[in-house]
Amino acid sequence: MSVKIFDTHAHYDDEAFDEDREELIKAVHEAGVCKIVDIACSMETSKKMPEFINDYDFMYGTVGVHPDDIYNLTDSDMDELKELSKNEKIIAIGEIGLDYHYDDIDKELQKKWFEVQLELARELKLPISIHSRDAAKDTLDIMKALHGEDIGGVMHCFGYGVEVAKQYLDMGYYIGVGGVVTFKNGRKLKEVVEYAPLDRIVIETDCPYLSPVPFRGKRNDSGNLTYVVEEIARLKGVDVDEVYEVTYANAHKMYRI
């Protein structure tokens, strides 16, 4: 079969691509990356998103504010996100969630804006892309308390073990798998990939970050998803073509395209 790839989580608006963005996106598209979702992280990237994705007919976008960027948010920003989401190519709210990795954070404020954006997604009937780092319990507690199963979406760059994965799978969420699955120290994610049904896995780059082996530490792009697919196929004992086909279909279902 001809390879069809859906990169469900990219940041091509990042300055890391300023020098060669257009040529690179054209090249990965010609190499079989049929669809890309560019993910917003802040109010600034959300505001620019409709115009950015408009340049590429195979690219979709999200609006939303990453937990690292919630510190100056206001209620009027939520009104603006709502307005931006009226663009038909804005297909999800994200990336939103909790990130407790650093010391100088306000957990309560992060939780507040995660909850507010969850409710925004519910109101807009859009799926969510969740970022959760070193915050397994609080993320899950909020998702259960706010009936996240009614919203749907993806656990982006999944970083927890099988027990946590099971709970999100039970809630109807997809597991986002990227370059970490190829890392030697990516054992937890490998176990999650072995455990999760293939029809609940989507592939993502998080580019320019998290390049798979053998490009770890270098700038990532959607062309590297072949390495992610090969590792998923190896872990699940299935044909590479099956992984391409199923994850491509999964991404359409998850984003309701």
Image (cartoon, helix red, strand yellow):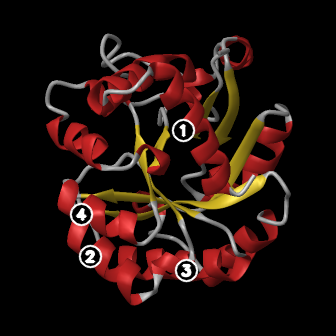
Q: Which residue is mark 2?
A: 138
Labels 4 and 2 touching (C-beta < 8 A): no
The earlier-in-sequence mark between 3 and 1 is: 3
Residue situated in front as seen by the camera: 206 or 172 = 172
Q: What amino acid does circle 2 point to?
A: Asp
Q: Position of residue 54 (x, y in %)?
A: 85, 39
Q: Is residue 47 above or below residue 118?
A: above
Indicate the quadrant containing the N terminus: top left, top right, bottom left or bottom right. Answer: top right
Q: CA distance from mark 3 to mark 2?
A: 18 Å
Q: CA distance from mark 3 to mark 4?
A: 18 Å
Identify the residue shown where x is 69% and y is 20%. 25
The earlier-in-sequence mark between 3 and 4 is: 3
Q: CA distance from mark 4 to mark 2?
A: 12 Å
Q: Secondary structure at mark 1?
A: helix
Would residue 189 be found to the left or right of residue 210 on screen?
left
Q: What amino acid does circle 4 point to?
A: Val
Q: Which residue is mark 1?
A: 247
Residue situated in front as seen by the camera: 163 or 238 = 238
Q: CA distance from mark 3 to mark 1?
A: 22 Å
Q: Which residue is mark 4?
A: 164
Q: Position of residue 59 (x, y in %)?
A: 75, 37
Q: Secondary structure at mark 2?
A: helix
Q: Position of residue 149 (x, y in %)?
A: 48, 77
